[in-house]
């Protein structure tokens, strides 16, 4: 094998390792950020003074807002699992359906789904939101048909 081919192959392996390392670093950062987010939401949900401070005008009353914050914890957890590759689209659809089968899940998405759409950073966030919104719509439609 000629030297240029060996050098090119070694460079390709090096680039592949850098790409993989960068992907793993982003996954770790996303998981760590989610850990911090979970702690913060837990504190706000359980502390009435903090909850009052962060409840915007026009948002649900304090008790309802606390319930929605707990749902936000689950939705955020699913989002980071999807981002980190721990859920594929089919698994996310199953998990989202499970959340939306609960009234609090549907209420959360009705209240904050548009905000999640606005804050979407990239295709991964938009895909997550689309799948979750589809499951929300399917169950809202089912509720409407049942009544």
Image: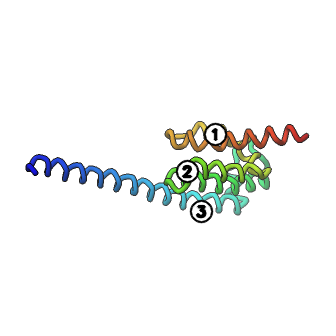
Point out which mark residue 88 bears. Answer: 2
What SS does tag 3 mark? helix
- Rendered residue at 58%/51% (across/down): 79
Residue at the spot of label 3? 39
Q: Which residue is at 51% across, 50% downward?
A: 83
Report the residue at 75% width, 46% height from top. 106
Mark 3, other Cα within 10 Å: few <14 / some 14–19 / many ≥20: few
Contact, mark 2 vs mark 1 (Cβ under 8 Å): no
- Horizontal side of residue 110 vs 143, given as left or right: left
Circle 3 or circle 2, nearest the eye: 2
Task: Tell which residue pokes out farthest to the front in this image.
Answer: 1
Q: Residues within 10 Å of mark 1 (few under 14, many from 20)?
A: few
Q: Residue at x 81, y 41 (%)?
A: 142
Question: Percent position (x, y) of residue 32?
Answer: 49, 60
**Crowdedness near tag 2: few (<14), some (14–19) or many (≥20) residues, C-alpha within 10 Å:** few
Who comes first in sequence, dot 2 or dot 1? Answer: 2
Q: Position of residue 66 (x, y in %)?
A: 74, 56
- Please count the marks in the image: 3
Disc 3/disc 2 C-alpha distance (Å):
25 Å
The residue to which callout 1 is attached is: 115
Residue 57 visible in the snapshot? no
Between 75 and 112, which is closer to the camera in this rendering? 75
Q: Earlier in the sequence, mark 3 or mark 1?
A: 3
């Amino acid at each position: 094998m000629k030297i240029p081919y060996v050098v090119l192959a070694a460079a390709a392996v090096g680039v592949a390792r850098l790409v993989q390392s960068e992907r793993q670093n982003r996954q770790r950062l996303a998981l760590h950020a989610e850990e911090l987010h979970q702690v913060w939401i837990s504190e706000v949900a359980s502390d009435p003074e903090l909850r009052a401070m962060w409840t915007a005008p026009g948002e649900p009353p304090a008790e309802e807002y606390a319930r929605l914050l707990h749902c936000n914890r689950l939705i955020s957890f699913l989002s980071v699992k999807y981002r980190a590759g721990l859920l594929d689209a089919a698994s996310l659809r199953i998990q989202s359906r499970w959340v939306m089968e609960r009234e609090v899940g549907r209420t959360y998405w009705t209240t904050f789904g548009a905000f999640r759409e606005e804050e979407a950073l990239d295709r991964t966030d938009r895909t997550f939101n689309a799948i979750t919104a589809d499951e929300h719509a399917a169950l809202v439609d089912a509720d409407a048909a049942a009544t």
